[in-house]
Image: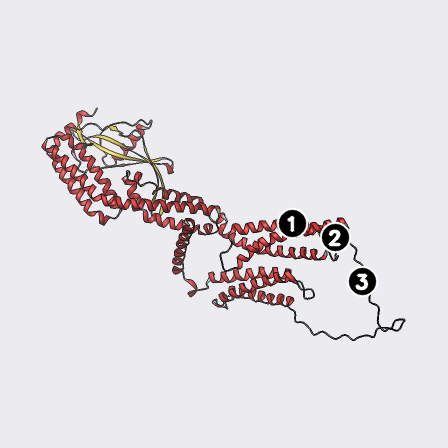
Amino acid sequence: MRRQMSRLVLRAMATTLFVGVMCMGVGSVYGLDEALLGKAENEVKNAEYDLKSARESAGTAANPAKGSRAKLTTMRLDSAQKRLDQAAVYLKELPADDASVSSVQGRYDTAAAGVAEVRAILNPSAPPKEAKPVESAPADAEGSGEAEPAPAPTVPKLDYKQEELLKNARWYVRETTGYTNAVAAVVARIDADGPKPVHSEIRDGLATVETAKKKHALAADYIAQLPAGHPQVQPVADQVTEAAALIGAQESRLRAVDVELAKLTGMEHYPNYDADFKLMQDLAGRYRSFGFTVQQPEKLAQVVQEDGQVLAEITRIAKTYVPLVEQKTDAGDQMERIFNHFQSSRNEFAAELVEYKKTLPAAFEADLKEAMDIADQGVAEQKPMFFGENSGIEQRFGWAETKLLVLRAFGEEEAKPYVTRLAEVRAQVREQAKSLEAKIIAENTLPPDRYTGGDRDVLVEYATKAWAEQQPDAQVLTACIPSQDWTRDTRWQWSNGAFYKIDASNVQVQLIIKHDDKLAVVRPVNLYKNHLKGDTVNAYPMDEAGEELQPRRYLMLEKVE
């Protein structure tokens, strides 16, 4: 049931998008309807295939097909006529004076005449029989007046070896019939109003035809070793002949459909399959675990903010590979499985996100209240460390900012009150810190320096050059790198109407720059290494030279070694 539902979803997506494309196109109002012409030509072409097969099995006017062979020919003619009737509906809607339409119309007329011609072979007008004059039979010697009947021809009996050959021929005719019956069931579905056979069934049908041909060849070989025209042999020989015509017709029909379906299932028509499959896999991974993602606010915000673009991209991919899914190819089944996984993961993720969103405003306000309480305590107890770089106040502000990041992902308008509220509280705490500014600066220490990579000097050089563009006369006293190594980030990001792969690492260098005769100032510079562009590194200062900084960013010059 789940597979069936997902196929319906894929079809619905494709239908919606195709309708949109059709509405945007010029259509038949402003020129030839190429799509309608293509349908007409396709119907005529299939009718021509059917007619060709009918000609092969119809016999001649002098010796028309009979029995099962006549039924087979009639079935083929009916199929050809059905296709021509549909082609006529399409051609009626097209401009007759167009050269392309005239060409198809000519083929239609030729095929229609051909159908009538073959039907005439099967059902010739019976001419009146002329009465033959009755000749007087010569009287016999006794004068009876009646001729002696001609003696019945003597038919030689088959010997035991010939009987064995005929037995084998019958066996392989029955074998052949079993396979052609199986193929006939597939062929019948091609023209039926119900579900059409998928490409794999057509290919299986062609494989069965090959088996039927092998069995038929054995039957024909045995018949060839028997006396032609023998009363016991002839019925089996006729069956072998009819089977050859049937196999040829079935193969011709299946080959025609195989060619058409190959245009839908041939992977050469889907050059981006691997890339699209990998992209769908990665996009589905965004919704893998809400519990894990909620601990990474930046990632959660991106998931929320780009959800609409993800759905649009998933829809594009799904629509592209609907033919593979409907034809039940391995590639289609694989794409459908990842699509089902995406649906399931996103639904579960969305349910948890809805509940989490309800808690954000209260949790955001709680973080701000704790920050204000700590600030009040710091001022009351004259404790400057409460306002330091890694203080409880900054920790609470950090928590509030991550929650605000997620709130803004839902929409800037909805987040405006929280943006204003955070700015107000920060300004309030900044004013409180001014009363302890001198003590805060006096207690500030150098940032930690934990980096262990061999490229440390190179990173410091990148950061120094980047800051020099802001402050050419800057005197760098030392540099600290708080993290032990680069942090790598690999993901897809929406930009300029498409998803782009990001594979980059980042690290922050904190330059300690002389401020005046007593103070130094910490200037963070963020470095980004792009792994998709030969590990090129770019550096971006976090501040601007003239920007007002909080006391926690300054330290006494004497503390810089």
Residue 271 visible (yes or no)? no
Disc 2 marks which residue?
A: 226
- Asked whether 376 or 211 is in front, the reply is 211
Disc 1 marks which residue?
A: 215
> In the rendered image, which quarter is residue 157 located in?
bottom right
Which of marks 3 and 1 precedes in the sequence?
3
Amino acid tagged 3: Ala
Q: Is residue 191 left or right of residue 281?
A: right
Q: How is the image coloured?
A: secondary structure
Q: Residues within 10 Å of mark 2 (few under 14, many from 20)?
A: many
Residue 505 vertical position relative to residue 197 in the rendered view, above or below: above
Q: Residues within 10 Å of mark 3 (few under 14, many from 20)?
A: few
> In the rendered image, which quarter is residue 233 located in?
bottom right
Disc 3 marks which residue?
A: 152
Amino acid tagged 2: Leu
Which of marks 2 and 1 precedes in the sequence?
1
Q: How far across and how far down the image is residue 199, in percent?
A: 52, 51
Q: How far across and how far down the image is residue 475, in percent?
A: 22, 30
Q: How far across and how far down the image is residue 196, in percent?
A: 50, 56
For label 1, the SS is: helix
Q: Residue at x 22, y 35 (%)?
A: 471
Residue 206 visible (yes or no)? yes
Q: Residue at x 28, y 45 (%)?
A: 353
Which of marks 2 and 3 precedes in the sequence?
3
Amino acid tagged 1: Lys
